[in-house]
Amino acid sequence: MNRKIFRGVKIVVLVYCVLGIALFYLQNVFLFHPEALPRTYKYKFDVPFEETEIALNKTDTFSLVKFFPVGKMPKGVVLYFHGNRTNINRYVQFMSVFTSRNYEVWMGDYPGFGKSTGERTEENMYAQADQLYRLALSAYGKDSIIFYGKSLGTGVATYLASREQGKQLILETPYYSIPGIFACYAPIYPVSRMIHFKLPSNEYLPDVAAPVTIFHGTDDGVIPYRCAERLKQFLKPGDRFITIEDGSHHDLGNFPQYRQTMDSLLRIP
């Protein structure tokens, strides 16, 4: 009997170690799903747009696409930080939320995504965000700049909004931090010491002066609702955490609650 118990303990320890090693060495594979594009690639969108390439240093470039409203003077600009998959092509479907309400949308790709080049580090993602904001200031006043983050991009958007002034910060399916996401799935591991990327929204959110609106669905299978709900404690009076019942990670835009709130937010003079 003792032998069986000992053998069972060994198997449990072995499985724990194997999974922990896989989590440590494959964390970037779990976290990022980029699709690089050649520099000669031509975007084809059904909305007015302009492509810009920004040299961050001698080797790294930041690929940016600006989407424009049709026929009207823009009210402002939305700095859109997208999720962890493919590149800008995947997220253009969400632009009409903003362009139909007369906002420009500026969306860049992270290093290794689309045409952006360079090492994918947290510091480089922040440097891209800083550059994007400086560029926006050359065309718009601070009260006309909206920070918008979706999924992975919510951490970057929150970082930028904690450092710079803007009209508002809007987060769609955010997380407490990157280690916090892994902890939701693997609570038995010391993820705070294992995970390289932090993107600590929990640390940045208290320093955001702009109004904050958060959307999260109760059926989110990528970033569980309970992991995002922890951000409520960092919201200011007047900030909103909007729970969308039965909403998943990819379909919040289909719910009237999301559309009505966005209409209200983006129609503010």
Image (cartoon, rainbow, N blue to C red):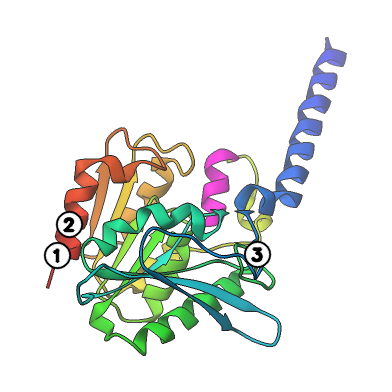
What's the distance in space between the residues labelled 3 and 1, CA to CA? Answer: 35 Å
On screen, 172 above or below 4?
A: below
Q: Residue furthest top?
A: 1
| 120 and 229: which is toward the camera | 120
Image quadrant containing the N terminus: top right
Residue type at the position of mark 2: Asp
Q: Residue furthest bottom?
A: 138
| Residue 185 belongs to the span the image colors magenta | yes
| Residue 73 belongs to the span the image colors magenta | no
- Label 1–label 2 contact, CB within 8 A: yes
Give the mark nearer the N terminus: 2 vs 3.
Answer: 3
On screen, 83 above or below 227?
A: below
Q: For residue 266, which quarter of the picture? A: bottom left
Give the mark nearer the N terminus: 3 vs 1.
Answer: 3
- Residue 204 in view here: no
| Left or right, 122 with reference to 20 | left
Crowding at dot 1, Cα within 10 Å, few <14 / some 14-19 / many 20+, comes out as few
Which residue is under mark 1? Answer: 267
Residue type at the position of mark 1: Arg
Which residue is under mark 3? Answer: 112
What's the distance in space between the residues labelled 1 and 2, CA to CA? Answer: 6 Å
Q: For residue 136, which quarter of the picture? A: bottom left
| Left or right, 102 with reference to 228 | left
Crowding at dot 3, Cα within 10 Å, few <14 / some 14-19 / many 20+, comes out as many
* Magenta residues, start to end: 178-186
Which residue is under mark 2? Answer: 263
- Label 2–label 3 contact, CB within 8 A: no
Q: Main secondary structure of the magenta part?
A: helix
On screen, 56 above or below 233?
A: below
- Residue 119 on image: x %, y %: 69, 71
